[in-house]
Image (spheres, grey):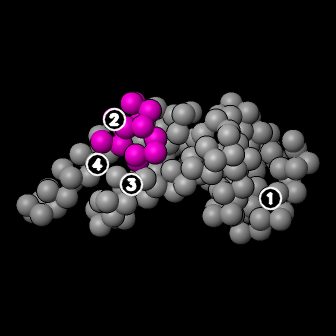
Amino acid sequence: MDRERAEAITELAALHAAVDRLLAERRYDDIAPLLKGQEELAENDNAAVITYYMCLIHAKEKESGEETILTKIGTMDELVERFTRLKFLLRRLDYGVSDDGTASLKRFLERQRVSLCELATMLEYCVLDKDKVWEEIRRAL
């Protein structure tokens, strides 16, 4: 591995640690500015990009007085896992390949306390046939 690549990996690890520290300290509103300030580094890291967009959901939820997505997780890795699981549950409905219809999604939404804002944002960015998926969710809930 060349020196430049090794330095980038070290910088990313430090960025992830800083985000985890802010999460642990419940300084949620400081996360997006941190990532934005490290934009060149963060834009090439899937976890950082996901975290940044989840911070936008956090801001919307906070503005509406809801419990926010960032209060429901402990680390950046947990946030990425939550995003990924929800994305794939929604895509299974979108592509019509869900084994149990909406049951898995419904369990996930309940257990993870997914807000309507989070669900709507994920639908907007993760599925092709938004109307179809919304209708399936509406019928299930």
Q: Secondary structure at mark 1?
A: helix
State how far apart marks 2 and 3 are (Cα). 14 Å
Please state which of residues 71 and 44 is positioned toward the viewer in this rendering.
71
Question: Is residue 121 placed above or below 72 in the rendered structure?
Answer: below
Q: Is residue 104 visible?
A: no
Circle 4 packing at 10 Å, graded few (<14), some (14-19), many (20+), is some
Q: Secondary structure at mark 4?
A: helix
State how far apart marks 2 and 1 are (Cα). 36 Å
- Check disc 4 and report the residue beneath it: 15
Q: Which residues are magenta?
A: 18-31
- Check disc 1 and report the residue beneath it: 133
Circle 1 packing at 10 Å, graded few (<14), some (14-19), many (20+), is many
Question: Is residue 104 placed above or below 130 in the rendered structure?
Answer: above
Q: Nearer the viewer, mark 2 or mark 1?
A: 2
Q: Which mark is residue 33?
A: 3
- Check disc 2 and report the residue beneath it: 21
Which amino acid does the dot numbered 2 rest on? Arg
Residue 9 image position (x, y, % from top left): 21, 53
